Image (cartoon, rainbow, N blue to C red):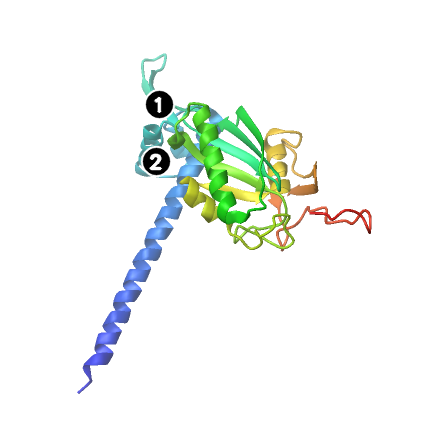
Amino acid sequence: MRPWYPQTFDGQRQHEKKAEHKSRKGSDQRHIRASNRILLLNYIREKKTLPRSELARYSGLSRTAIGNIVDELVREGIVLQEDHRTGDDRRTMLLSFNAHGGYVLGGTLGRQHLTILLADLLGTPLQRLDVPFSTLDGPTEGLPRLGNMLKAFVAEQQIEWKKIVGIGLGIVGPLDPLLQSTTIPTPFSGWAGVTIQPLLEKILGLPVYLDNDGNMGALGESRYGAGRNKSDMIYVKVGSGIAGGLILNGQLYRGCAGTAGEIGHIPVEVDGMLCH
């Protein structure tokens, strides 16, 4: 006779495997839905106005999937829909991207300075904040203080915080793109190895996109500035330090260590002032 405990253990393992598979399947489905949402939203934004039926031809998604995503975007106010009649009196539903359906924040965090920009969903700048910001007290005090400053800035524009859909923040110094943490050498004393993104997302309650300020500058110029419609470009930022970013084949190039485009830490005067 077989003892009872292997059967119990096997049953438990099977139950755990089923639960793990179910969890992974749910995670995959959420990822697919999020990807489809981004796909449709970017297309609507690019086209500005289009018939709802065009989304099926463009995306290859089912009408049910498209309907669920579009209805969600309409409820959120990001997409507008209008009942339209053509010249032959045929009825069609037109969709348009609502640039004022929400707002985004973007900015740069330096060792002693903070720059934040408020923009609509098309990236049109609306208001800017330039203030001193010390990082010397470390992330434990610095990040909550940053969160409070961002919320106060938005409130001054008489905008509800729930209308902010996300923030993109560039920081000086190298950054681990996978861990979203600062790496050595960092100009922020006491910030090395700190995973800034999840900490800031918890404080703000909204998605945070974090990257090196050189990479963020390169992305901005490639999409909205001097590098628009260029497949390859290099961006150089000169301030209290020197930063750089590379766009190759239309994509941000990070390199194996995530530091591609960095100009480097170059001693100018051997016995000169200490460089931070």
Q: Residues within 10 Å of mark 1 (few under 14, many from 20)?
A: some
Closer to us: 276 or 37? 276
Residue 122 visible to an observer of this rendering: no
Closer to us: 167 or 253? 167
- Of the image marks 1 and 2, the number of the one nearer the N terminus: 2
User: Which residue is farthest left?
Assistant: 1
Q: How far across and down, in percent of the image, does residue 52 sit?
A: 37, 27
Task: Say if 48 sits above or below 170 in the image.
Answer: above
Looking at the rendered structure, the secondary structure element under dot 2 is helix
State which quadrant residue 59 falls in: top left
Mark 1: amino acid:
Gln
Q: Can you identify the residue that label 1 sits on? A: 81
Residue at x-position 76% and y-position 49%: 266
Q: Residues within 10 Å of mark 2 (few under 14, many from 20)?
A: some
- Left or right: 135 as drawn, with respect to 237: left
Q: How far across and down, in percent of the image, does residue 100 sit?
A: 43, 23
Task: Say if 124 sits above or below 133 in the image.
Answer: above
Task: Say if 262 sits above or below 78 in the image.
Answer: below
Residue at x-position 61% and y-position 50%: 189
Q: How far across and down, in percent of the image, does residue 129 sit?
A: 55, 28
Closer to us: 49 or 121? 121
- Left or right: 125 as drawn, with respect to 79: right
- Disc ID at residue 69: 2
Mark 2: amino acid:
Ile
